[in-house]
Amino acid sequence: MVSGIPVTIKAAEKLPQESEQKSEPHEFSKEKKKGLYEAIYKRRDMRHFLPDPVDPTVLGRILDAAHHAGSVGFMQPWNFIVIDDPEIKQTMAKNFSSANADAEKNYSGLRKELYQSLKLEGITDSPINLVVTCDKTRNGPHVLGRNTMPETDVFSACCAVQNLWLAARAEGIAVGWVSIIDPERLKQDLGLPENIEIVAYLCVGHTQSFYKKPMLESAGWGKRLALKNLVYYNRWKGTSESYTLNFPD
């Protein structure tokens, strides 16, 4: 099925090999490295959730991992809004439906049919929704490192989202990012101040199984690009005669 639930994935081949010996004084043990890489390679943008509640202690751990993300100037611009109220989730689902109807207009023919077949949210299916925000006024107007690149506050909040996602995967908790949503309507419905910017709307919960591949890849919407074609040396599209990376298979 295009957006059905595939079988649980097998161990990723890109994980550190058992035979690898510790070569750097500060590197993790092979077991710890394997766990980190496994969380990265098995992370999925999930759309299928079970109604089972999420243990608040587990979710607290996940948010603590998010809170330990790197941030430019140590600004820590994030806040996390935990939504478990069914009525609020219904309001958010209506927001998605409206935005999704507009998004469909960008496609035609077979591409539109494929788009319409995709399950693109789990707002009411998941027991918890999370909104990650960015406070653009936190720590004042001159945050160390942000003066020349003001967007780094949002970039920093995105680092928190990634930490959250990887920690959730390590805990066996599914996360799905819903970006087809009207942010201004969302801000109004949640009573957000003007200086607060929405970074991510996330669905969080247990799942029957994690997708074997990214759902959009399995559906034929897109495919992962070859890393070797995305890496340059010394300048845009530059090469190097002295240093060449070795990528996993």
Image (cartoon, helix red, strand yellow):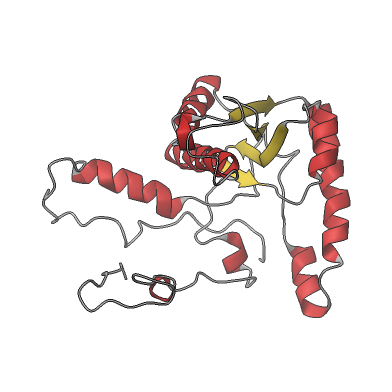
Q: Is residue 90 visible?
A: no
- Looking at the rendering, which quadrant does residue 123 occupy? top right
Q: Tell me the residue at 81%/47% (across/down).
A: 96
Query: In x, y percent, where is residue 138?
Result: 60, 26
Seen from the viewer's position, the closer of residues 62 and 66 is 66
Image quadrant containing the C terminus: bottom left
- The single residue placed furthest to the top in the displayed view is 57
Seen from the viewer's position, the closer of residues 123 and 6 is 123
Q: Can you say whether 234 is above or below 184 in the image?
A: below
Q: Can you say whether 13 is above or below 84 in the image?
A: below
Q: Tell me the residue at 55%/46% (across/down).
A: 149
Image quadrant containing the N terminus: bottom right
Q: Tell me the residue at 58%/51% (across/down).
A: 45
Query: In x, y percent, where is residue 223?
Result: 55, 71
Seen from the viewer's position, the closer of residues 130 and 245 is 245
Seen from the viewer's position, the closer of residues 45 and 63 is 63
Query: In x, y percent, where is residue 69?
Result: 45, 35
Q: Can you say whether 181 is above or below 133 in the image?
A: below
Q: Tell me the residue at 71%/26% (across/down).
A: 84
Query: In x, y percent, where is residue 179?
Result: 71, 50
Decide if residue 31 is on the left or right side of residue 4.
Answer: left
Decide if residue 215 is on the left or right side of residue 40.
Answer: right
